[in-house]
């Protein structure tokens, strides 16, 4: 599913689980949806499972937002106590859209507690989360929930998850890694199909570290290693360090939450030659969260650090602000130079970052997903350097793997269903209704004609399949038809399938309308279909390691000659 398809589904007000591989644009999609809501006068509650994740999205932790704090269980008395706190009641009652980021690190117990509080405060005990739209965002292949007794269940195992009746939106575009060989490695780990070949590919990047550029950051699984390396490296540089201290204002509990989540330290000491990493996206000067650079000097007067990025840009880094916003008002904020020493960083703190290069030590990986998170931070195989590895580093939770297959399949079903709503004109009607229900304003139902208020004459109505058929006969490709009709490729593929079933079109005409890449790959894909005695696309997608989209697989299945098709099913 593309980001635009997911946004159209979100705008209808249904509860959504937005997921996808690292780099697929989950955060970008959430930010776009938040902007869409605000443009219509709706202020969403933007939260996350951890402080670090909360700082990435200018929100607060779901624990703080809901008033549950650090509790792992709520009694009736606890719920009553939370429901008597005026500020908590006010924020929950006025919320019509709740977004929870990094849901993979949220336990099922916490999700259930938030659900219980929302039902109580909103006086709607029979409606999940008191009837608000809930958007859960994350990837369960990443770091799992943390619990004091190490027995936390995944959020998808909770009753609250089931009662939300979430629509799965599985983003399939890739915006971080463009290295196909590296993507295949990550896909093999994710699909639990990694083998000796996968290991061999990773181990071609093995190094003892001695000949490695010192400027490349190290990722470790334990804090002690990170602190030791950064302190040692800084102490070897000549000169007196420049010290930058964090400033703060607002509610003390929120300030503390911001500090815990901020990747920049409260006290940052820098020297010329220090290797640093950006800790916050700053489009104004091109420094982003994860950008690597070296300190080359300090600006006269302000003492702001001047850095040279690894791709050769010279930037002056001024203070930035991290804030908690609620109801359009800043409740708390901190200010600091958006940098941190980057000779070393923990895997945990790297989650959500995109890095040009990293040297990773996975010899002491101790939990599911840790290796996958570390590897997927890097943009290419060439930027990856392995300092240590253990077989456990490739392990992902078996239950997560099973659920991921399910989410992919549900997402494909949702995409098709909402495409049909789009064609029927019903999706926009749902969006209008949702915006009004949420107290926002939408564009007028009826737009005036360009020359005044006179109604324009209606064209004779043709079915959507007739229009697609005419364009196919004109020799246009499926991609061209989708673009011309402002529909998804999946919808046009569905049209082709129905036209073929109704014997209104020949297979040859469809084959001439598909891409050269797919035409060349048809024998390979159709051979894969023979290995699975089912019409399901998800097993084929996994078997081919994501090399082809679901639309391409659907077309390949459609174009199988009758003899082969009978052999498959």
Image (spheres, rainbow, N blue to C red):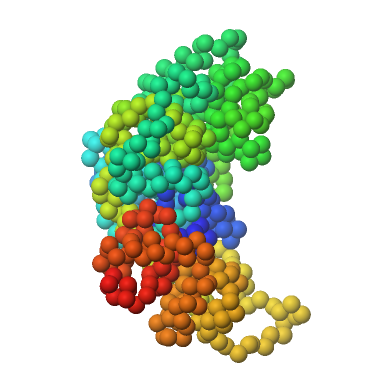
Q: x, y (%) of residue 99?
A: 44, 52
Q: x, y (%) of residue 222?
A: 35, 26
| Vertical order, 62 against 205 (above or below) | below
Question: Which residue appears at 52% of the width and 42% of the height?
Answer: 58
| Vertical order, 206 against 547 (above or below) | above
Residue 113 visible, this angle: no
Direction bottom: furthest residue: 460
Q: x, y (%) of residue 249?
A: 55, 32
Which residue occupies the foreground of this view, 147 or 491? 491
Which residue occupies the foreground of this view, 162 or 113? 162
Identify the image quadrant of the C terminus: bottom left
How many tags in the picture?
A: 0
Q: x, y (%) of residue 272?
A: 61, 17
Residue 151: image quadrant is top left
Residue 534 visible, this angle: yes
| Residue 123 falls left or right of residue 480 | left
Question: Which residue appears at 72% of the width and 19% of the height?
Answer: 300
């Amino acid at each position: 599913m593309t980001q635009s398809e997911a946004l159209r589904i979100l705008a209808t007000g249904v509860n959504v689980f937005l997921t996808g591989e690292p780099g697929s644009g989950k955060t970008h999609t959430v930010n776009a949806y938040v902007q869409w809501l605000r443009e219509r006068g709706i202020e969403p509650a933007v939260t996350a499972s951890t402080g670090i994740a909360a700082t990435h999205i200018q929100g607060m932790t779901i624990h703080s937002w809901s008033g549950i704090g650090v509790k792992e269980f709520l009694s009736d008395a606890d719920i009553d106590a939370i429901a008597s706190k005026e500020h908590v009641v006010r924020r929950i009652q006025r919320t019509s859209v709740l977004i929870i980021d990094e849901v993979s690190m949220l336990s099922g117990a916490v999700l259930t507690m938030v659900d219980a509080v929302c039902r109580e405060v909103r006086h709607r005990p029979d409606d999940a989360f008191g009837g608000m739209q809930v958007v859960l965002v994350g990837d369960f292949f990443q770091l799992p929930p943390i619990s004091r007794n190490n027995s936390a269940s995944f959020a998808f195992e909770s009753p609250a998850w089931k009662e939300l009746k979430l629509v799965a939106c599985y983003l399939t575009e890739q915006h971080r890694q463009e290295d196909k060989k590296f993507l295949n490695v990550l896909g093999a780990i994710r699909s639990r199909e990694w083998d000796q070949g996968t290991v061999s590919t990773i181990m071609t990047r093995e190094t003892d570290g001695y000949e490695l550029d010192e400027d490349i950051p190290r990722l470790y699984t334990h804090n002690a290693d990170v602190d030791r390396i950064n302190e040692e490296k800084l102490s070897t540089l000549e000169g007196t360090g420049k010290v930058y201290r964090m400033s703060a204002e607002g509610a003390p509990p929120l300030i503390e939450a911001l500090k815990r989540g901020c990747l920049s330290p409260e006290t940052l000491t820098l020297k010329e030659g220090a290797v640093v990493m950006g800790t916050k996206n700053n489009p104004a000067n091109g420094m982003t969260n994860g950008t690597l650079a070296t300190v080359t000097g300090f600006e006269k007067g302000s003492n702001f650090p001047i850095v040279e990025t690894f791709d050769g840009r010279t930037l002056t880094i001024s203070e930035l602000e991290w804030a908690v916003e609620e109801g359009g008002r800043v409740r708390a904020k901190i200010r600091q130079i958006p940098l941190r020493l980057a000779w070393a960083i923990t895997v945990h703190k790297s989650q959500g970052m995109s890095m040009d290069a990293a040297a990773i030590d996975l010899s002491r990986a101790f939990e599911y997903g840790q290796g996958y998170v570390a590897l997927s931070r890097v943009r290419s195989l060439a930027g990856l350097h392995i300092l240590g590895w253990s077989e456990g580093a490739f392990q992902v939770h078996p239950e997560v793997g099973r659920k991921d297959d399910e989410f992919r399949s549900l997402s494909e079903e949702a995409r098709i269903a909402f495409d049909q709503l789009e064609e029927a004109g019903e999706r926009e009607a749902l969006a209008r209704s949702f915006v009004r229900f949420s107290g926002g304003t939408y564009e007028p139902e009826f737009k005036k004609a360009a020359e005044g208020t006179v109604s324009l004459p209606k064209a004779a109505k043709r079915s959507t399949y007739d229009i697609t058929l005419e364009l196919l006969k004109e020799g246009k490709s499926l991609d061209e038809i989708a673009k011309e009709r402002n529909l998804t490729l999946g919808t046009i593929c569905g049209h082709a399938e129905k036209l073929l079933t109704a014997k209104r079109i020949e297979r040859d005409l469809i084959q001439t309308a598909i891409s050269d890449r797919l035409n060349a790959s048809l024998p390979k894909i159709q051979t894969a279909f023979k290995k699975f005695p089912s019409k399901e696309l998800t097993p084929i997608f996994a078997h081919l390691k994501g090399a082809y989209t679901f639309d391409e697989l659907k077309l390949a299945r459609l174009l199988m000659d009758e003899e082969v098709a009978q052999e498959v099913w």
